[in-house]
Image: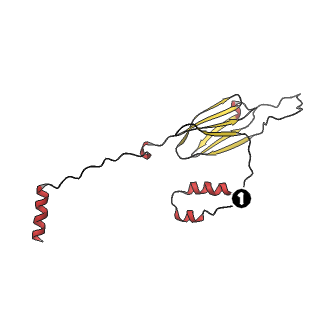
């Protein structure tokens, strides 16, 4: 049994986190779990990731990959004609159309996609812009006030 979490208090007190909260809220909804095609998600480095999808029976031309902002959509649609004069005694290789969506974190970029021997490999990398990376701020030592500044301050105190 799945329990639901109410995120409305977070919506009332958070600014700029709508996308994250909507993703959490959406994951709470019961959805029919479609587990085809099977896939793996791997972290291969500090900012490097890889998705591997087993897509037997498809050709490279049957597949489309589209990255729209923070969503990667992988779709497969067979374009070839079915074989005539063939009677399947058992059909275990799935050939149905599919669309798989992967939610990506900010600044994730698809580096490349490779399809070989029925395995689609998608390489991703997080590329944080220079302006958003942590930067070192130099601390300057405070200089003692000059004699002329001290004289002006003393003159004001005597006059006032």
Residue 82: image location, x then y, percent:
82, 31
Report the side of 10 relative to 40 (left or right): left
Q: Residue at coordinates 63% horizontally, 40% vertically from top-left?
A: 41
Q: Residue at coordinates 65% horizontally, 55% vertically from top-left?
A: 26
Residue 3: image location, x then y, percent:
69, 61
Quadrant into which the N terminus falls: bottom right
Q: Who is closer to the viewer here, 79 or 132?
A: 132
Label 1 crowd bin: few (<14), some (14–19), many (20+), radius 10 Å: few
Report the side of 23 relative to 47 (left or right): right
Mark 1 — residue? Answer: 2
Instruction: Answer with the quarter of the image where residue 81 lies.
Output: top right
Q: Residue at coordinates 62% horizontally, 35% vertically from top-left?
A: 122
**Please, which colouring scheme is shown?**
secondary structure
Q: Residue at coordinates 68% horizontally, 37% vertically from top-left?
A: 53
Residue 57: image location, x then y, percent:
76, 32
Kindly state the secondary structure of the residue where label 1 is placed. loop
Q: Is residue 63 above or below residue 19?
A: above
């Amino acid at each position: 049994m799945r329990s639901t979490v109410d995120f409305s208090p977070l919506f009332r007190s958070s600014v700029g986190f709508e996308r994250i909260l909507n993703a959490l809220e959406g994951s709470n909804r019961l959805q029919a779990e479609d587990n085809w095609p099977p896939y793996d998600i791997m972290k291969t480095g500090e900012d490097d990731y890889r998705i591997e999808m087993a897509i037997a029976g498809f050709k490279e031309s049957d597949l489309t990959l589209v990255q729209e902002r923070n969503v990667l959509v992988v779709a497969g649609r067979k374009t070839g004609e079915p074989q005539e004069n063939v009677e399947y005694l058992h059909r275990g290789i799935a050939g149905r159309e599919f669309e798989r969506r992967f939610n990506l974190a900010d600044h994730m970029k698809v580096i490349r996609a490779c399809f070989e021997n029925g395995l689609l490999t998608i390489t991703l990398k997080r590329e944080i812009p220079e302006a958003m990376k942590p930067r070192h701020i130099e601390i300057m030592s405070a200089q003692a006030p000059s004699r002329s500044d001290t004289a002006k301050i003393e003159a004001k105190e005597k006059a006032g």
